[in-house]
């Protein structure tokens, strides 16, 4: 029997994949990655074993996920198509890395996942795995099995006695981690339909949020958030704290039409309160401490870095080279940003840094002004002379 390591979430696709792979003659080992889903992993492991898995690994990857993946993207300013904070996309190369390690430990022949042939995650899993070990076979049951719809999968699961949490009335595909949540499928596939409130799990409806704003102070050290309201938190606890506060004020909802890597457009719903807060604060701090040319140049790097994450190219040479550049830009990204959260809005209302490039005596129109405005006439003539 060939051994296969399946990245298992406990959802509809991967639950059906266990039984399907078993029926094809595979010895199935499942790998359950805890990236902050806040789920009952004992129950998920038991479900996998009862469905037909021979072995089950559960690894707590939350610390590594936040410190090495989420914060790397934050420092880069990576936002795909200026809206998606990449919460799901960031978890995939991490999961794939550990999936390969388990395959080596178990001397497995193949890796499997529950991604569809239309999605981005299939690319992220398989490209990462192939970079780390080209010899491992990749199996994608959803791309090749006989089921054409999620409803057919639900029928298969019921026929085989596979416990699942989805129904035909609520066929949403949901992925959650410590950073944020992705929701798709079902009625959301019609881009004209307003998302029903039932899909949201991390954020309250902004119109039902508190009538008074809340103020937050986020302190950064070299681009990394270290304190909230002057209190130090671990990286994972910072995300938890900001998800809680931001979610309670309706901050972090995104409804977008995005361009998938495979060439189609899809309608995606995202929740990422902590990311919305941290990106807003981080970008404002960079505006305060970076020189103009670095700041403008880095905007292009941010777009490229987001593409690399989205396209599953985390382990590539270019991404690692960009990390070196980005870390250099963060040397002086130290300081505090004050934010006001109010009914879905996240607004910057204060900023300070020991490395601030803002000089009041140059910017002011008051009595402290030391800017020699007479110099501007010559500057303008020279600046415009080539044209």
Image: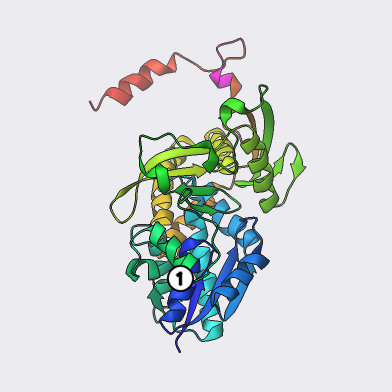
State which quadrant residue 312 falls in: bottom left
Q: Which residue occupies 56% across, 16% down?
A: 364
Q: Which residue occupies 55% across, 71% down?
A: 98
Which residue has dot 1 on it?
17
Q: Which quarter of the image is occupied by the C terminus? A: top left
Bounds of the magenta segment: 361-365
Q: Which quarter of the image is occupied by the N terminus? A: bottom left
Image position of 76 with respect to 113: above or below: above
Residue 326, image x and y in percent? 50, 51
- Would you say residue 209 sits in the magenta stretch? no
Q: Residue furthest top?
A: 367
Image position of 349 with respect to 163: above or below: above
Q: Which residue occupies 58% across, 68% down?
A: 32
Q: Closest to the observer: 300 or 273?
A: 273
Residue 141, image x and y in percent? 39, 70
Image position of 254 with respect to 239: above or below: above
Report the number of numbered marks. Answer: 1
State which quadrant residue 243 falls in: top right
Secondary structure mostly seen in magenta is: helix
Q: Closest to the observer: 43 or 102?
A: 43
């Amino acid at each position: 029997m060939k051994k296969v390591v399946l990245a298992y979430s406990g959802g509809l696709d991967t639950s059906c994949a266990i039984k399907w792979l078993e029926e094809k003659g595979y010895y199935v080992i499942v790998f359950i990655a805890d990236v902050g889903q806040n789920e009952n992993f004992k129950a998920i492991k038991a479900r996998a074993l009862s469905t037909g898995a021979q072995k089950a690994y559960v690894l707590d990857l939350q610390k590594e996920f936040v410190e090495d993946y989420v914060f790397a993207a934050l420092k880069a300013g990576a936002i795909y198509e200026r809206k998606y904070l990449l919460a799901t996309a960031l978890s995939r190369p991490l999961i794939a890395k550990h999936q390969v390690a388990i395959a080596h430990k178990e001397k497995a022949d193949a890796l499997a996942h529950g991604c569809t042939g239309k999605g981005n995650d299939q690319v992220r899993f398989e490209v990462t795995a192939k970079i780390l070990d080209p010899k491992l076979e990749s199996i994608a049951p959803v791309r090749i099995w006989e089921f054409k719809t999620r409803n057919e999968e639900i029928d298969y699961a019921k026929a085989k006695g596979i416990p699942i949490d989805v129904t035909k009335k609520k066929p949403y595909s949901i992925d959650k981690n410590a950073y944020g949540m992705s929701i798709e499928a079902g009625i959301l596939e019609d881009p004209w339909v307003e998302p029903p409130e039932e899909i949201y799990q991390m954020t309250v409806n902004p119109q039902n949020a508190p009538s008074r704003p809340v103020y937050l102070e986020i302190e950064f050290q070299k681009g990394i958030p270290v304190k909230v309201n002057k209190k130090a938190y671990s990286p994972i606890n910072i995300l938890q704290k900001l998800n809680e506060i931001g979610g309670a004020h309706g901050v972090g909802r995104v409804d977008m039409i995005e361009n998938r890597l495979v060439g189609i457009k899809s309608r995606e719903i995202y929740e990422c309160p902590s990311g919305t807060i941290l990106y807003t604060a981080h970008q404002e701090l960079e505006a305060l401490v970076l020189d103009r040319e670095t700041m403008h140049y880095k905007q292009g790097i941010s777009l490229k870095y987001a593409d690399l994450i989205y396209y599953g190219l985390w382990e590539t040479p270019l991404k690692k080279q960009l990390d070196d550049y980005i870390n250099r830009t963060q040397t002086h990204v130290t300081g505090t940003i004050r934010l006001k959260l109010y009914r879905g809005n996240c607004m910057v209302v204060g900023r300070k840094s020991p490395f601030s490039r803002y000089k009041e005596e140059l910017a002011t129109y008051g009595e402290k002004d030391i800017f020699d405005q007479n110099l501007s006439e010559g500057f303008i003539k020279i600046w415009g002379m080539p044209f």
